[in-house]
Amino acid sequence: MKYLAIEIENDGAKNEPFTPHLKNESLKVLEYYEKGVIREIYFDQFHCAILVLECNSINEAENIINTLPLVKNGLIHFEIRELLPYTGFSRLLQ
């Protein structure tokens, strides 16, 4: 199943240093990318990460996200949404 994870900075994190954690964050994301768990990664216009994950459940997606150093250090969290196939075209056949 595919999940969309949208980064959100935690309140008060703007005053915390992100820089010491960024290399480890990149290494962990690369590890999951190489395993095929993180399928795509982007930044949005606010420089927040947008991840597409391939997992068996939302719990698995949450557990993976919770291992990221910026999450573990309380700087960010992610809103996770399950992506479902689009069924809107079926309306055209009615």
Image: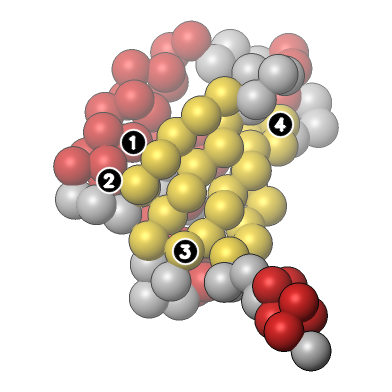
In the image, taking residue 30 as reference, residue 1 lies left or right, namely right
Which badge, 2 or 3, comes first in the chain's sequence? 3
| Quadrant of the image occupied by residue 49 | top right
Query: How many angstroms separate mark 4 from mark 1 (CA)?
Result: 17 Å
Q: Residues within 10 Å of mark 3 (few under 14, many from 20)?
A: many
Extreme residue toward the front, this view: 93
Q: Which mark is residue 29?
A: 1
| Quadrant of the image occupied by residue 87 | bottom right
Query: How many angstroms separate mark 2 from mark 4 (CA)?
Result: 21 Å
Q: Is residue 64 above or below residue 92?
A: above
Can residue 75 be seen here?
no
Which badge, 4 or 1, comes first in the chain's sequence? 4
Nearer the camera: disc 1 or disc 3: 3
Query: How many angstroms separate mark 1 from mark 3 (CA)?
Result: 16 Å
Can residue 24 be seen here?
yes
Give the residue type at disc 3: Lys
Residue ID for mark 4: 9
Query: How many angstroms separate mark 2 from mark 3 (CA)?
Result: 14 Å
Q: Is residue 89 above or below residue 94?
A: above
Which percent across, then down, holds residue 53? 42, 54
Which badge, 1 or 3, comes first in the chain's sequence? 3
Residue ID for mark 3: 2
Q: Nearer the viewer, residue 46 or 28?
A: 46
In the image, taking residue 48 as reference, residue 30 lies left or right, namely left
Residue ID for mark 2: 32
Give the residue type at disc 2: Tyr
Q: Is residue 89 above or below residue 70?
A: below
Residue at image coords 58%, 12%: 17
